[in-house]
Image (cartoon, grey):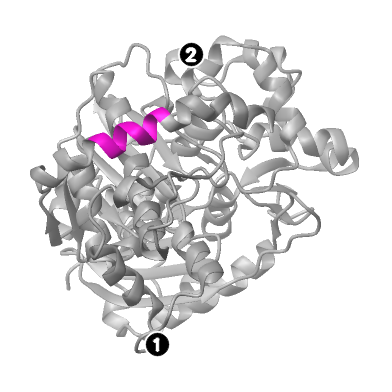
Amino acid sequence: MASLFLGMDTGTQGVRISICDEQGNVRASCERQWDTDYPMIGRAEQSPAHWWESIRYALGECCRQLTEEERKSVVAGAIGATSSTVIPVKEDGTPMAPAIMWMDARAREEMRAINATGHKMLEYCGGAVSFEWLIPKVLWIRNNEPEIYGTMFRAVEQLDWLNYQFTGVWCASKCTAVCKWNYSDAAGGFSDDFFGAIGFPEYREKILTDVRRIGDPVGTIRPELAAEFGLPENLLFVQGAIDAHAGLFGMNAFADRRMGVIMGTSFVHLSQVSGEPESVEGIWGPYQNALEDGMWLFEGGQITASGLVNWFRKNFHTPVIDGNPYKVLSEAALEIEPGAEGLTVLDFFQGNRTPYKDADAKGVFYGLNIKHTWKHMYKALLESVSFGTRNIIDNQIRQGYDVDLVVGCGGVNKDRQWMQMIADITGKQIVVNEESQPVVMGCCVIAAAGGRCYQTFQEAADAMIRVKDTYIPDMEKHAAYEEPYQRYLRLYSELKDMMASH
């Protein structure tokens, strides 16, 4: 019997679990949703107990889809999780409060205080920390919930808690530590000087400091869980990653000069490069050895992307044909020539993540004329998101790190016309893989590497991931988009001061 591998994606909206074989064929799969609570403006929380209930249900359903022989052939598993989703816990894993979600903004003041130090360690995370990250959230707990802070074992990530639930082992993922915890190999790991400078000298007693690389063993499954699900007692859980970063493995987009773009409500752009970057602006990072040793990870992103499609549909009441409003929108965009007849949109409806890192940036419609219709407005919205992705790619290329291939995943993949537009505007070939759940498949790739079936992540990905669609850029259209793209860039440059003051 061939070996099987378990992948788990614990996202914002729920859990997806798949069990696949050595060729990446999914043998069993199940999803389960969970809720997010918003107790007040700027806060978002979830229940770890609800996570665990949903995960056990989904894993049970997967195991029921397998034969007994197949269940006993599951060799290893890995988890991708939201980050930084933070839980203060007792040593036995009991949560002491609801999980503070990655999107929760309560730690803004702690973020500002850390960034005000200007400490050298900030150079390893793009120059500043975010309120989304673990350290500001731990300091918020200390400043606002001292009774919890004083008695908690540690404040841990969702990934850490789930690994513990399955194995009884407490450890941290190097991926989350490097990208969200101010950990850097260049500084020898955690820096006592940095944590002293930000007023957190006791950090070793409040966060996990056993940091393990992606794919390193965490521990074997608890015997009682093995019995519950009919899984082998030697089933090994290996260290996973932040969900989007695990998705890079599931997209086979982690090789040098490739970029993986998660194309959903927001866009996330991830690429690894070899060789130590000198000075890189307009990205998060560069993160050293976050995914693989000897590589540096660049992270870019657009806060509002396909979310603008939903905004437009909701507010402009697009007609519906055959129950599918998106079909109407997609066909309408084809009627309008590149550049939307002079109409330019800035896609910064919730600020700009990269390359400007401007929280004050705002959405703009510029150049409206009486001849413009809703179709022009929609076309210009799609172009603006596409321009934003080109801006992120161009920013990386200007600094000496080219991109040969873009691998896309997410809801936007369903709109073939928009995917072709992104290829035309960026001038980059885009591929889409057969597997529609790259985080889950990425976890299976991670689990299968390290000698468990394949030696390297690349060997595993090449064997388990298959290309479905390829978009070749039309270079004539690429040239036609040059002037509208330059207008997009200039528009932000001209308006950014006004945006900051209003």
Which label lies toward us, 1 or 2? Answer: 1
- Residue type of the residue flagged with mark 2: Ala
Q: Nearer the viewer, residue 320 or 469?
A: 320
The residue range painted magenta reads: 483-490
Neighbours of disc 1 within 10 Å: few (<14), some (14-19), many (20+)? few
Between marks 1 and 2, how big is the CA–CA gap? 56 Å
Q: What element carries label 2?
A: helix
Instruction: Describe residue 442's horizontal placement relative to residue 491 as left or right.
Output: left
Percent across and percent down for residue 262 are 36, 52
Q: Residue 90 carries which label?
A: none
Residue drawn 68% across the image and 28% down it:
501
Q: Which mark is residue 323?
A: 1
Percent across and percent down for residue 123 are 49, 16
- Residue type of the residue flagged with mark 1: Gly
Q: Which of 16 and 115 is in front in this view?
A: 115
Give the labeled residue for mark 2.
Answer: 187
Q: Residue furthest right?
A: 147
Which comes sooner in the sequence, label 1 or label 2?
A: 2
Residue drawn 47% across the image and 80% down it:
60
Percent across and percent down for residue 380 are 37, 52
Where's the N terminus, which quadrant? bottom left
Q: Determine the main secondary structure of the stretch shown in magenta.
A: helix
Compared to residue 26, the image places residue 333 above or below, namely above
Q: Which corner quadrant of the image does residue 64 belong to?
A: bottom left
Compared to residue 376, the image places residue 238 above or below, namely above
Instruction: Describe residue 397's horizontal placement relative to residue 153 as left or right.
Output: left
Q: Which of 466 and 379 is in front in this view?
A: 379
Where's the C terminus, which quadrant? top right
